[in-house]
Image: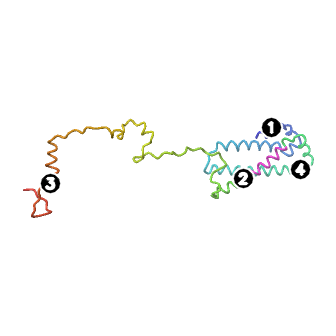
């Protein structure tokens, strides 16, 4: 991008020259520079995943192929003409070199995009991520165990808990309150003692009197 802007500004008089108008090298360089800005901008702001990313990759593939073909045909025309090549190599060498770089740049990225999309759409395990857009940062999963009714308490919570620990009071002597004698007698007579069962019918519970 920087070289494209520099070459266009440096060799701006080529627009009015016959070689510039016949070869359209200035227009080609300008469109490649704008296309490069567009590619970098959408790389960072375009949402990843889904059909939108695939549509962007398809548009980039078509444009890279078009610019590579246009640049290669322009290069062949300049070399076959015989009149503009010495002028471009002598007076406008910066933009002429940039045109050559654009041809190789578009050809390489066209090949990479075709291979990338073929592997992604084909479901290949070699490429599991979309490299045509910037990766999205997502929060990492929690390292601690999930909280729940059966989850162990966190050591931090155990240290800062205001509830007194029972373990620390094991060695302390505690006084159990005495039970009243009436309560002990009721338990002894009504609960712990079983009624006398008749011996003539073992296994038969006593029935209430009518």
Distance from disc 1 to disc 3, alpha carbons, whole Å, reads: 109 Å
Task: Indicate which disc residue 157 carries.
Answer: none
> Looking at the image, which residue is at 79% across and 40% down?
3
> Looking at the image, which residue is at 13% across and 59% down?
205
> Which is nearer the N-term, disc 2 or disc 3?
2
Labelled pair 2, 3 in contact (Cβ < 8 Å): no
> Which is nearer the N-term, disc 2 or disc 4?
4
Which element carries disc 2, helix, strand or loop? helix
Answer above or below: position of 72 versus 200: above
Q: Position of residue 8 (x, y in %)?
A: 81, 39
Q: Position of residue 184 (x, y in %)?
A: 16, 44
Q: Residues within 10 Å of mark 1 (few under 14, many from 20)?
A: some
Q: Is 187 colored magenta in this rendering?
A: no
Residue that carries the numbered disc 3 in the rendered image = 194
Which element carries disc 1, helix, strand or loop? helix
**Colour scheme shown:** rainbow
Q: Residues within 10 Å of mark 3 (few under 14, many from 20)?
A: few
Distance from disc 3 to disc 4, alpha carbons, whole Å, reads: 120 Å
Labelled pair 3, 4 in contact (Cβ < 8 Å): no
Task: Indicate which disc residue 6 carries.
Answer: 1
Distance from disc 2 to disc 3, alpha carbons, whole Å, reads: 92 Å
> Which is nearer the N-term, disc 1 or disc 3?
1
Residue that carries the numbered disc 2 in the rendered image = 112
Distance from disc 4 to disc 1, alpha carbons, whole Å, reads: 24 Å
Task: Indicate which disc residue 79 carries.
Answer: 4
> Which is nearer the N-term, disc 4 or disc 1?
1
Distance from disc 2 to disc 4, alpha carbons, whole Å, reads: 28 Å
Residue stretch rendered in magenta on the structure: 96-109
> Looking at the image, which residue is at 13% across and 62% down?
204
Q: Is 99 colored magenta in this rendering?
A: yes
Closest to the camera, between mark 2 and mark 4, is 2
Viewer-nearest residue: 18 or 45: 45
């Amino acid at each position: 991008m920087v070289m494209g802007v520099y070459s266009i500004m440096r060799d701006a008089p080529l627009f009015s020259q016959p070689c510039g108008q016949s070869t359209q090298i200035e227009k080609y360089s300008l469109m490649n520079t704008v296309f490069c800005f567009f590619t970098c901008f959408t790389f960072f702001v375009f949402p990843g995943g889904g059909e939108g990313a695939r549509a962007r990759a398809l548009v980039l593939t078509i444009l890279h192929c078009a610019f590579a073909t246009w640049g290669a045909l322009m290069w062949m025309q300049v070399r076959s003409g015989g009149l503009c090549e010495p002028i471009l190599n002598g007076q406008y060498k910066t933009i002429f070199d940039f045109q050559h770089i654009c041809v190789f740049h578009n050809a390489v990225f066209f090949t990479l995009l075709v291979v990338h999309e073929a592997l992604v759409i084909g479901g290949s395990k070699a490429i599991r991520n979309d490299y045509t857009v910037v990766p999205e940062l997502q929060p990492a999963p929690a390292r601690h165990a999930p909280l729940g009714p059966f989850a162990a308490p966190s050591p931090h919570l155990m240290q800062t808990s205001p509830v007194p620990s029972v373990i620390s009071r094991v060695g302390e002597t505690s006084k159990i309150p005495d039970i009243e004698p009436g309560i002990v007698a009721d338990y002894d007579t009504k609960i712990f003692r079983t009624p006398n069962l008749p011996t003539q019918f073992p296994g038969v519970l006593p029935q209430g009197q009518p």
